[in-house]
Every structure is written in structure tokens, then in C-alpha cells.
Image: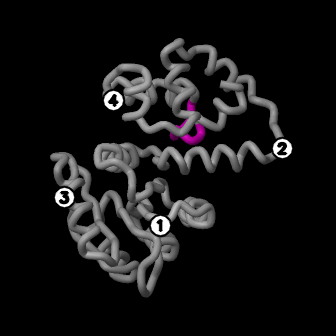
Amino acid sequence: MIRLLLVDDEALVRHGLRTILESDPDIVVVDEATDGVEAVELAYRHRPDIVLTDIRMPRADGLATTRELTRLPNPPKVIVLTTFGLDEYIYGALKAGAVGFLLKDTPPADLIQGVKTVAEGNAMLSPCVTMRVINEFADQPATEVPEDILRRFDTLTEREREVLRLVTRGLANSDIAQELFMSEATVKTHVSHVLNKLGVGNRVQAAIWSYRLGV
């Protein structure tokens, strides 16, 4: 069971998120906070696995909240969920210690999957956020691809390379499933195999190496 704390200053948003998340039997919302200060207090009390927090809130915003949460003993994993896909928020959240950054227009199924992905120990970014990170990386001076990455890439099957190509384009699992005419569960399996074979922790790292390899 994934124990999750919701943080948002709007009651209607919290209600909608709780309804979506608790529609999955593997997720339970242990409590709700209206701002960052309350979030840290409740996180200390409930010890949730994941904190899903907004960016813009009174008293302490999502970035400050993330920094405080990551300082707790046995800190929860933090996912930032916001309407604002601004670069300053994306990099600020990741720098503060967030392992997920999703936009509020994320489809319900992808939100649930994002929570599960983070609970499994992986990072999760919205597809458009993934593309921004890749583009930022692409603007940096090129570096030689390590030999071990090249060898690992050669172990990918043709189908896994197709999936990686679409991950690199920033597509979510649901979109990849439609593109390749397969189930989301099958896509998830392929993505997992790609990450394991490349020896990376999340799809953003896989996408960056894919970009470097010319996929």
C-alpha cells in the first residue's frame, strides 16, 4: 500500500486528487495539508511514502516545502504537481529534491502511474517536462557516449528501441501504447526493460542517452 499526503491550498483540487488517487486500491491518502508548513508537520506525524504537493501556496511554497521534507528522518519521496510548467519551477523542484514533476493536466491514469513509478524508486516527469530537460541538456556541449552505454544499447530489442524513441519524444505510456498498438501494461514492461538494460534510474536519463545516441 502506498501512503500519500496531499498538499494544496484549494479544497476542490484536493478533493479531486483524492478521488482519483484512491480509485486505485494500492494508494491511500493519509491526510491533506493546505500549505507547506502544515505539510511538514503532517509528514512528520504520518510518515507517508509520498508527498504530492502544489507549487504556489501560502506560508511555504512547494519548493521550500520540498527542501524541508527531504530533511526529515526517512524522508518521503516528493512529487510536485502544478499548473505552471515554467523552467524555474522544474529545475527548482528537482534541485530541491523532488523526484517527480507533473502538470495538473496529467490524465488520471498517468497520475496514478506516476505515483506508483515514484513509489518503486524511479523518477517521473510529465512528457513535456521531459522534453524541456532533454532540450536543456542538448544545448550543453556534446560529450562522448561512454562505451558501456553503447554496449548496453546494443542489447535492446527492436521493440524496446521503438519504445525508447517515443520516450525520447516525451510521450507518456498511454500515448506510446496508442502509437505502437499495445497495452499500457506492455509499454510499462518495455520501459522497465529499457531502464534496466541501460542501467539508468528513470526515463529522463534514458531519454538523454537516447538523444546522444541519435535515436
Label 4 to label 1: alpha-carbon separation = 32 Å
Left or right: 46 in relation to 100? left
Foreground of the two, 123 or 129: 129
Compare residues 50 and 100 and report the one nearer the observer.
100
Going from N to C along the chain, the mark reached first, 2 or 3, is 3
Pick whichever of labels 4 and 1 is earlier in the sequence. 1
Instruction: Give the residue type at disc 1.
Output: Thr
Q: Mark 3 falls on what kind of element? A: helix
| Residue that extends furthest to the bottom in the rendered view of this protein | 59
Residue ID for mark 2: 141
How far across and how far down the image is residue 184, in percent? 33, 29
How far across and how far down the image is residue 209, in percent? Answer: 66, 33
* Numbered badge on residue 70: 1
Asked whether the viewer can see residue 119, the reply is no
Q: Considering the image in quadrants, where does the C terminus appear?
A: top right
How dense is the environment of label 1, judged by Cα within 10 Å: few (below 14), some, or many (20 and up)? some
Q: Mark 2 or mark 1, which has the lower sequence index? A: 1
